[in-house]
Image: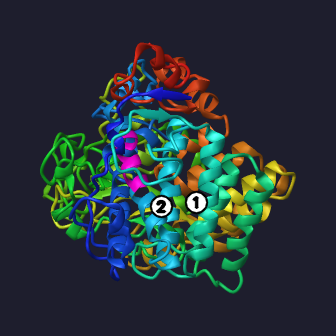
């Protein structure tokens, strides 16, 4: 599909850093020229720029909005700014959140093209392997969002472009996937077994994405083969350094991001908050958010403005509890159906905040003083009886929120979208200031997802998905007693678990499933339990052909149910791109279903 237009996205300029040291430290430096990539320093600087720009893709508000809401897992929250995306409105092609991946990714693909084309002779194979992995990663984000995109940026397919182009050719999805697959395979051959520096990629990440790409093109046998290569090694010699942690909670624990289960992440360090390159975009200053990891804001409720039943407000904004932007909130399906098992499965407690402790002293709902550190708000996760609720309030003085209290308003209003279980996995209690974005790396790919890729590939190819599903479910049966000290009364975590009715052996038995229970819907449910809110859900539903079905069944918004169509598996090409074209070309360049 050949269309003529001026493509500003293929500009030569990129923002570089001079360091590719033990820790990726990105700061803007200069423009790229072909001979820049003939030295190790130039290659390393180009790589650092390409790593840095992944911050646009993972953690900012726009990136979260186009991947999280409008699914069965999340809908818009009390702020309501993501309504258009959630409800599949008619103006999606003008949505600014979709412009970022389209406008940004090609620049850094071009950077990788330059490294690969001009640095192959002088650069180490490992660095060239990193460039191929990153180029494929950028294309993966583009093709899963928009479908077929250009492989030729003006100088030939996968070639470095040095001048503005007047031609845009949208390759087919199949052609883009084929190019990505070759890059991921080449990267696997060249990358080290363990990352040479913090934040860089290694063989394990390449194996994961080879399997994931094969799954996307429905080559299930190859998807299973490559996923098994990584899983078998994780359960055996651990040559690639990856394995499942014992405790699900530890995978996402603040400060533990560089753990053996994480295959690929995007760094957002404290230093990067002070210099996050946001001035590079249309907005200036450290709060512009173009690269900030704001995941800790997105699913945080407005706790500081909520009162007890008596009207007293027991909480102020804190670093620990976050900044309540409430852009998204979990659907009733996610909280009550996907996570229906809350005793034997530890993942609900490890994923969602259930209790907030008072930060100021007020009179509680039982007439007694609520001291700092006492339970102020409590979400049991099930519908208590009136007697249970009354007894809890009388004992603690806290306000109890039942699932029916935070079920989204049927009329689309925001009254019941203010207070809901917060996403603990993305919280950032170690950041410096109460209003700061997250300083945590964003976890992009985990070994647990590799297990789920293997399960789906096995199912779809007529094999047995049970070992891969049960490996995750049996891991989820484990609860560390140290996390439950003080959870009920006293400081004995094991005793508190017993009070909850938890027994590890009983949990193992309950969490182990038989083959006849596992179908594609079960695997998608398991993905929610393992990975909800991690910028994966929209793509998984679109890829499996389940987007329309699951939105209509499980997203609570009536406009979303009414509007969603099969063509929504792809996002529209941004109108800013279409406006550069002739009238003759516009209709053919846009994705089906979006032509005005």
Disc number placed over residue 173 in the picture, else none: none
Residue 250, image x and y in percent?
47, 72
N-terminal of the pair, mark 2 or mark 1, is: 2
Q: Is there any visible trace of residue 9 in the rendered image?
A: yes
> With respect to residue 143, does 160 lie above or below?
below
Q: CA distance from mark 2 to mark 1?
A: 40 Å
* Picture quadrant where residue 32 is located: bottom left
- Per the image, the residue denoted by label 1 is 343
Q: Nearer the viewer, residue 211 or 439?
A: 211
Residue 47, image x and y in percent?
38, 67
Secondary structure at numbered mark 2: helix
Q: Residue sitting at 40 percent across and 40 percent down?
A: 102
Secondary structure at numbered mark 1: loop
Q: Are marks 2 and 1 in contact (CB under 8 Å)?
A: no
Q: Is there any visible trace of residue 341 in the rendered image?
A: no
Q: Residues within 10 Å of mark 1 (few under 14, many from 20)?
A: some
- Seen as rendered, the residue at the extreme right is 462
> With respect to residue 116, does 198 lie above or below?
below
> Magenta residues, as a range?
100-110
Disc number placed over residue 134 in the picture, else none: 2
* Picture quadrant where residue 242 is located: bottom right
Q: Residue sitting at 44 percent across and 43 percent down?
A: 154
């Amino acid at each position: 599909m050949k269309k003529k237009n001026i493509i500003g996205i293929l500009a030569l300029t990129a923002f570089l850093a001079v360091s590719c040291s033990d820790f990726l430290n990105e700061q803007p430096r200069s423009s790229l020229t072909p001979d820049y990539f003939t030295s190790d320093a130039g290659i390393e600087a180009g790589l650092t720029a390409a790593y840095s720009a992944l911050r646009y893709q993972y953690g900012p508000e726009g990136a979260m909005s186009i991947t999280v809401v409008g699914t069965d897992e999340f809908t818009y929250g009390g702020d309501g700014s993501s309504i258009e995306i959630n409800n599949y409105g008619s103006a999606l092609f003008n949505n600014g959140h979709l412009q970022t991946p389209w406008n940004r990714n090609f620049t850094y693909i071009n950077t990788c093209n330059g490294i690969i084309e001009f640095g192959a002779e002088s650069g180490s194979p490992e660095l060239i392997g990193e460039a191929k992995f990153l180029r494929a990663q950028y294309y993966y984000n583009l093709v899963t969002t928009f479908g077929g995109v250009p492989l030729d940026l003006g100088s030939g397919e996968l070639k470095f472009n040095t001048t503005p182009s007047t031609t845009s050719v949208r390759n087919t999805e199949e052609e883009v996937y084929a190019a990505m697959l070759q890059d991921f395979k080449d990267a696997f051959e060249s990358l080290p077994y363990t990352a040479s520096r913090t934040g860089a990629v290694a063989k394990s990440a390449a194996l994961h994405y080879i399997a994931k790409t094969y799954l996307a093109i429905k080559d299930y046998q190859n998807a299973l083969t490559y996923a098994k290569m990584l899983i078998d090694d994780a359960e055996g010699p651990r040559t690639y350094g990856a394995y499942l942690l014992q405790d699900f909670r530890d995978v996402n624990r603040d400060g533990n991001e560089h753990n053996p289960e994480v295959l690929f992440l995007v760094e957002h360090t404290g230093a990067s908050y002070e210099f996050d390159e946001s001035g590079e975009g249309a907005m200036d200053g450290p709060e512009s958010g173009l690269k900030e990891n704001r995941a800790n804001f997105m699913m945080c409720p407005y706790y500081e403005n909520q009162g007890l039943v008596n009207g007293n407000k027991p909480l102020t904004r804190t670093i620990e509890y976050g900044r309540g932007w409430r852009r998204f909130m979990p659907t009733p399906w996610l909280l009550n159906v996907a996570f229906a098992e809350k005793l034997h499965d530890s993942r609900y407690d490890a994923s969602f905040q259930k209790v907030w402790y008072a930060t100021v002293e007020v009179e509680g709902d039982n007439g007694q003083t609520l001291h700092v550190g006492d339970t102020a708000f409590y979400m049991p996760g099930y519908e208590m009886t009136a007697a249970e609720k009354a007894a809890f309030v009388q004992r603690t003085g806290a306000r109890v929120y039942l699932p029916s209290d935070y079920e989204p308003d049927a009329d689309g209003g925001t009254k019941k979208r203010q207070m809901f279980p917060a996403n603990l996995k993305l919280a950032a209690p170690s950041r410096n200031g109460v209003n700061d974005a997250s300083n945590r790396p964003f976890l992009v790919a985990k070994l647990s997802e590799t297990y789920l890729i293997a399960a789906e590939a096995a199912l779809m190819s007529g094999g047995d998905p049970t070992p891969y599903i049960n490996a995750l479910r049996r891991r989820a049966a484990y609860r560390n007693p140290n996390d439950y000290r003080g959870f009920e009364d006293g400081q004995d975590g094991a005793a508190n678990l017993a009070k909850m009715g938890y027994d590890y052996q009983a949990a193992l038995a309950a969490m182990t499933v038989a083959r006849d229970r596992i179908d594609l819907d079960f695997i998608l449910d398991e993905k929610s339990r393992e990975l909800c809110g991690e910028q994966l859900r929209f793509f998984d539903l679109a890829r499996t052909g389940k987007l329309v079905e699951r939105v209509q069944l499980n997203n609570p918004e009536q406009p979303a149910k009414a509007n969603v169509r099969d063509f929504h598996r792809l996002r529209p090409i941004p109108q800013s791109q279409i406006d550069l074209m002739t009238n003759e070309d516009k209709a053919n360049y846009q994705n089906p279903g979006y032509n005005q």
